[in-house]
Amino acid sequence: MCETVEGASTDLKPQGLRDLAGSELEEEYAQFGIAFPERQLELQLLYGDSQRAFEAKTRESLKCTVQQVLNNVLHDQRLGDSGPDKHLADYLEREILRIRVRIDQDGQLAVNRGLNAGFVAGVFLLFVPLLAGEKLLGLCDVALNCTDRWSLLGASVCGGAGAFGAVLSVLTRLRNSDDLTRRPANGGKATVAPGQLSRSMRRGGVHRIFLGWLLAIAAYLLLSTGLVTAIEIPAAAADVCSSDSTANGTLFWGFWGAVGFLAGFNERWAYGLVGREVTTRQARG
């Protein structure tokens, strides 16, 4: 279970591509570097990335794949030709592309695992205080009348809808682009190990849920207190308490749920505002 969330433990003794060749194929490995220097370096980089894969089974599978590709090239009779063999070069290109695709899939798995764990933790931390808030007020001898109770429930609905709006916003952007995966590395996704990327996404999932919740609560306070009069509230807490009909209650829930969801869905605006502020300060400094 820990490996499912955190990923495989860090390999303290990573290997290089030359270690896979062994001393018995040292001459063939040197010929490989002379004939295909760029592909040898790329295969070396991919082998390093494969040893940092998120899942342990993926690490073993990629290690076996790289070793098999290297053995096939080193044992190929065309490696000793006067010039690079075209067919051998095409074989290396196809295998390198397949290995790169598998490494990218492993990175996406780390992102998804991290975000899912962050969302679960964020929702748990969010709704436990909200559901127990009224009982805690009762233990503190704080009496709530009908209007106060409905106002507290309205804030809970608005904040909860904002949290789920933030989740949907993140998942939508993650599906359409890889901006979220590039942020932890300051624009370079390839420099971040999948385990570290997963931890970063887990923290980001928790932060974004609380950011969506705060934006929704802020929208609730602005509208319910009358500070913003551009939007008319169809049913306030007092209207629900003073009426015997359930229509006002339905309007109350629906309105604040929609407001909270839209506020949470725009959490990207708040992150962008904070990012621009930090950039501006650094530029001035």
Image (cartoon, rainbow, N blue to C red):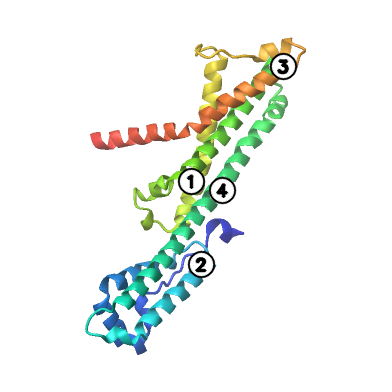
| Residue plotted at (47% across, 76% down) | 64
Q: Is residue 16 above or below residue 270?
A: below
Rendered location of residue 269, percent (x, y): 42, 32
Report the quarter where the N terminus lies: bottom right
Q: Which residue is mark 2?
A: 58
Q: Earlier in the sequence, mark 3 or mark 1?
A: 1
Q: In terms of sequence position, does the residue under pointer 3 or pointer 4 come before the other? A: 4
Q: Which of labels 1 and 4 is toward the front?
A: 1
Residue type at numbered disc 4? Asn
- The residue tagged with tag 3: helix, strand or loop? helix
For disc 4, the neighbor class at 10 Å (few under 14, some 14 to 19, many from 20) is many
Residue 123 at x, y percent in the picture: 60, 40
2 and 1 marks in contact (CB < 8 Å): no
The residue located at (33%, 87%) in the rendering is: 77
Alpha carbon of mark 4 to alpha carbon of mark 2: how far?
Answer: 20 Å
Q: Relative to 76, say whether 228 is above or below.
A: above
The kind of residue on which mark 3 rests is Ala
Which residue in the structure is indicated by mark 3? 247
- Looking at the picture, tell me which residue is in the foreground, 10 or 72: 72
Q: Residues within 10 Å of mark 1 (few under 14, many from 20)?
A: few
